[in-house]
Amino acid sequence: MADDPGGRHPRTARFFCKEGEYYFDAGKTYVLSNQWGHGTLETVDALASTYAAFDISYHATE
C-alpha cells in the first residue's frame, strides 16, 4: 500500500495491515478492515475456522 494517496486519513489506517496482520493464499494478500459493525465477529469467526492455518484471532481492546 505504498501508493496510498492519503487524504485526511490514509486508507491503510482502515485496515489491519502491519507486519503479521495480513494473510496470503493462492498468490493473493488479504487484510481485515478495522471498521467493524453488525455481523463482523461472526464473519471473522468463520474466516478463522475456514483458514485455521492462518491462526486468525482477535481480542477486545479498551
Image (cartoon, helix red, strand yellow):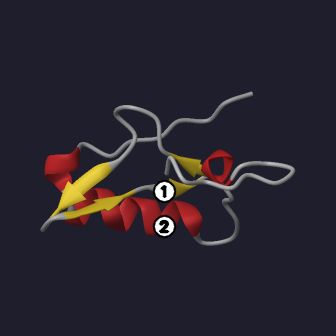
Q: Residue furthest right?
A: 8
Q: Classify the position of the C terminus by image quarter.
A: top right
Which quarter of the picture shows residue 50?
Answer: bottom left
Circle 2: element type: helix
* 2 or 1: mark nearer the eye: 1
Near mark 2 (Cα within 10 A), the count class, few <14, some 14-19 or many ≥20, is few
Which quarter of the picture shows residue 21?
Answer: top left
Q: Is residue 62 left or right of residue 26?
A: right
Q: Position of residue 11 (x, y in %)?
A: 66, 55
Circle 1: element type: strand
User: How many marks do you count on the picture?
Assistant: 2
Which quarter of the picture shows residue 51?
Answer: bottom left
- Mark toward the start of the polypeptide (2 vs 1): 1
Provide the residue designation for mark 1: 32
Q: Is residue 33 left or right of residue 32?
A: right
Residue drawn at the location 12% of the way across and 68% of the way down = 26
Residue drawn at the location 48% of the way across and 56% of the way down = 32
Please say if 41 is above or below 59: below
Please say if 60 is above or below 4: above
Give the camera-side residue of 46 and 13: 13
Q: Position of residue 42 (x, y in %)?
A: 48, 67
Dot 2 amino acid type: Glu
Residue drawn at the location 67% of the way across and 45% of the way down = 13
Residue drawn at the location 46% of the way across and 35% of the way down = 18
Give the camera-side residue of 2 and 44: 2
Provide the residue designation for mark 2: 42
Dot 1 amino acid type: Leu
Near mark 1 (Cα within 10 A), the count class, few <14, some 14-19 or many ≥20, is some
Q: Position of residue 34 (x, y in %)?
A: 62, 52
Give the numbered dot on residue 45: none
